[in-house]
Structure formats: C-alpha cells, structure tokens
Amino acid sequence: MAAGLTGGCACGAVRYELASEPMWVQCCHCRDCQRQTGSAFAVNGLIETDRIAVTGLTPVAIGVPTDSGRIHDIYRCPQCQTALWSDYGGKAYLRYVRAGTLDEPGRLRPDVHVHVRSRLDWVRIPDDVPAFDAFYDMKSVWSEQAQSRRAEASARYRT
C-alpha cells in the first residue's frame, strides 16, 4: 500500500495500513467527540473503507448514541477496546480513522476544525486552518479531489 500510514490498537491485536492518504482530515470539537474520546477534540482522517487493510483481529462496531439522536458506530479492538475508527449515519463506505491510533499521528494535520462553538477555551486553533462553529458545506470547503473520492466510494457501495 502506497500511503505508508500504519496504526493499531493499544495491545497490538489489531493493526492496519491505509492504501492512501485520507481524503480529508478534520478536528472535531463537539461534545460527542469530547465525551467519546475523553479529550478536548478528535482528529479524524476520512478515508474509503476499502482503503483500510486490517491484520490481526477484526475491530468490532459498537453503536454509540449521539446528541443528534443517530447512532454512530465506533470500531474498537475486541481485546483492549481502543477506538480505531468510526462511521457516521450508516455510511459504511467511509471511515473516520482516529489519528491518535496511527504509528505517526503527526502526519495527519487537520484541514478544518468543526463544532468550535463547543471548543474548550484553552484550545487554540491555527490561523491558517478554516474553523466553523458547527459543520460546513463540504462542496464549498473540500477539494475537488476529495469530493470526487467521496462520490466514487459512495457509488461503489451502492453497486
């Protein structure tokens, strides 16, 4: 796989490699992400599900309630319960890979910060990264390449 992005859980029972760089990286400051990670925010790399190669144990999807009322699946190591990635709204063709589970988490720099209205007051957002109080219009913010990859993944999933 070309990307060279590898990661895994805390106990090492689940390892993964990404076939490419994520199409988009976002830092989410919503209360759900704060609660689910036990941290100030979550940094997630959005990538097509079929671009994640798993070795070792298969992560288990755990449905977690959200403030929106929709279930959000968090995929965890069945042994140590490390959260590796998520999918939102039943879009099984996309995964939000938790950057902190990468062997080199610093390789994913956020393209955008979202839900900054619930950002903790001591968190500083870089001036050169777009930030939105809630979410944003993907068509006006995402690159054409990222939009194309998302559309292609959706089409593959429907066929």
Image (cartoon, rainbow, N blue to C red):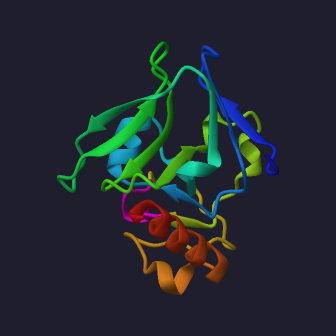
Which of the 4 quarters of the picture holds residue 34? top left
| Residue drawn at point x = 63 percent, y = 83 percent | 144
Q: Is residue 116 magenta?
A: yes
Q: Work out whether residue 123 can be spotted.
A: no
Q: Work out whether residue 157 can be spotted.
A: yes
In the image, 157 versus 5, the foreground residue is: 157
Left or right of 120? Residue 122 is right
Query: Magenta segment, which residues?
Result: 114-119
Left or right of 19? Residue 69 is left
Give percent across and percent down for residue 132: 46, 73
Left or right of 35? Residue 43 is right
Q: Is residue 92 above or below residue 142?
A: above
Q: Residue furthest bottom?
A: 140
| Residue drawn at point x = 57 percent, y = 67 percent | 112
| Residue drawn at point x = 50 percent, y = 50 percent | 95
Give percent across and percent down for residue 66: 25, 47
Give percent across and percent down for residue 10: 60, 19
* Quarter of the figure with the C terminus: bottom left
